[in-house]
Image (cartoon, rainbow, N blue to C red):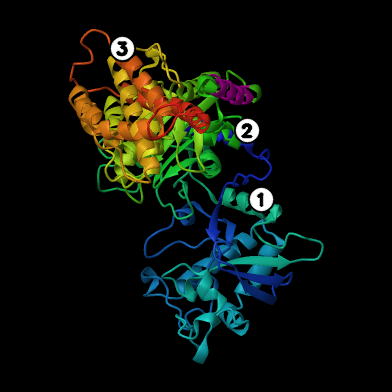
Amino acid sequence: MSWLQTLYETYESCKGREPAGSAVLMPIGHTTQQAHIEIVLDGQGNFRRASVLEKGAGTTLIPCTEESGGRAGSKPVNHPLCDKLQYLAGDFVKFGGEVTSGFAAAPEEPHREYLASLRAWASSGNGHSKLDAIHNYVQRGRVIEDLAASKILLAPDGKLLKTWEGEKDQTPAIYKSLPAGQVPEDAFVRWSVEETGNPASGTWQDDALIEAWIAHYASTQTRRGYCMVRGEQATLAVQHPAKLRNAGDKAKLISANDNTGYTFRGRFVEAGEAASVGFEVTQKAHNALRWLIARQGSRNGDQAIVSWAVSGQRMPDPMASTYDLLGIEPSQTPDAIEPVYTGQAFALRLSKAINGYRATLDPAENVVVMGLDSATPGRMAITYYREIRGSEFLERIEAWHLKCGWPQNFGKDTKFVGAPAPRDIAQAAYGRRLDEKLEKATRERLLSCIVDGSPIPLALIEATKRRTINRVGLDRWEWEKCLGIACALFKGQHTERNYQMALELKRTSRDYLYGRLLAIAEHIEGRALYLAGEKRETTASRLMQRFADRPNSAWRNIELALVPYKTRLRNLRPGFLHAMERELDDVMAAFEGDSFTSDGALSGEFLLSYHCQRQALRPADRAADEDESTDTTDSTTGDTP
């Protein structure tokens, strides 16, 4: 029950102190619903006007009961105030409206039940003037008639028109506002009551009406018992809220409505013996979770991952890349930073950002990381849950971005130094069209690596490496992205080797040197192809997979393929060729013993040196071009005039 208690404490801590521009925490006994029609009444309950709300613009806070908040099936329970036309309109059936299948035997029942609940609230000691006006209007039984007279609904011949078959550019607003598959009689209605001296005409805007419903609903609850969260006697919840991840989410974290299966039978006689939670606690806890997911959660289909501090202080998202965490400025892209200073500049910027979070967070305060997912539409599970000190959480976030920090190239507009997001890692390992279940599992495994400090799975590192070296079928930008991610993962797995983001001339391991050779060979051939105006893959890039598996054998083929390109460069760019041949000689001389002749497969280390060598050759290449422009050597004979 610790997650419920933590969320309850979060609600109590944050209610009324929501950041400016942020959504507010929902009051208990309420839910949100997409309204399609707004009916405006005066203070006596007389109809004034109605309007159709634009699609997606009708999110409305409405009172609800435990049963109506999680209603489903063919006979759904009515909401207390705002609802669909089959509940609100006494003339719904008269105008040809069709109720849901569970009410087919008694089509007047939905309106009768709604009117009874509305009357019970209005006649209780927790009424409200807006409620009285709505009750007075609804009991007249002319909602559909007024909406038809206002041209909100179309009812030729006294029957509701279900579909519009006229000109498309003349389609009435109600048909545009409804989701696909719904007809106008399915529209959800909200109320506004215009009263003198009250600027808040909407029922969802009136705090007094909201408090009136909370007080009335509390007076109707009779089930009391021991709340396992607060450790005291309280009014217990019968059902628990849904709609945690979005407005259409029916999955629940706590549910026990299966009296015939094995949900709780065999251990308990009644469901309440398994978990008894106070109504106020579960409402506030679920409202806090809903608010947190919407405000700062990371979503992937049905999977949601959210981290928060109980005090409400914003925390860094563990599922974000360094680009999303820190932002990036054009002057701070990898191409604009000198390679030798890249690692230092990145570490300094990351440290400043994390220190900004530390400045507003009590080091002893708890930070919670929670993962949610659902296998079925009605059941949700907590797939990951950690409570750690805020200082420790920030240390682990910083450690992840430091150890996996590497120059990333995600396309023309997204270049940064840092760690990739788990979503990008999953796509780099298994492709952009990977199975949703595989992506979820990969994100969850990486979440443990980030928050718990677990080692990065070797299978994931190997999958990313194999996809990077097998360049067939990858666009240039996608391959560059995979290359940066593969380097980041390998570097993060081998922190003891202290890999740098710039070329390390003193690192003479076999795999590192072979990666440098491949980059130089690719650079030589690429320059020759550019001068000839040819656009095709180099031999080095085409043989990259074979090179990774059998480097010595593949290098012979690559070196032989370079001969005609060297001849071309010797005539056109002798200075450039001389510099590259000297670079090749230096790398070859750095191999120790018989390590060069060994034909064993290369580890991911060769990708690091390959990436760094490519980066290092770019400024050298520009310098060589400048030298060529002032060279007095005859480009045909190679002799000095």
State the CA–CA distance, disc 2 to disc 1.
Answer: 19 Å
Q: Nearer the viewer, residue 169 or 489?
A: 489
Q: Specify the principal SS of the magenta part.
A: helix
Which residue is label 2 attached to? 13
The label shown at residue 211 is 1
Dot placed on the residue nearer the N-terminal end, 1 or 3: 1
In the rendering, at what x and y percent does residue 563 appear?
Answer: 26, 31
150 displayed left or right of 559: right
Check disc 2: other Cα within 10 Å, few if <14, some if 14-19, many if 20+.
Answer: some
| Residue 60 inside the magenta-drawn segment | no
Task: State the residue in front, 465 or 404.
Answer: 465
Task: State the residue in front, 340 or 370.
Answer: 340
Furthest-front residue in this view: 641
What residue sits 54% from the left and 81% below the top?
A: 169
**179 or 272, which is in the foreground?**
179
Of the two numbered discs 2 and 1 on the same chain, state the one appearing first in sequence.
2
Q: Amino acid at mark 2?
A: Ser
**Disc 3 element:** helix
User: What range of the chain is rendered magenta?
Assistant: 344-358
Q: Position of residue 422 (x, y in %)?
A: 40, 35
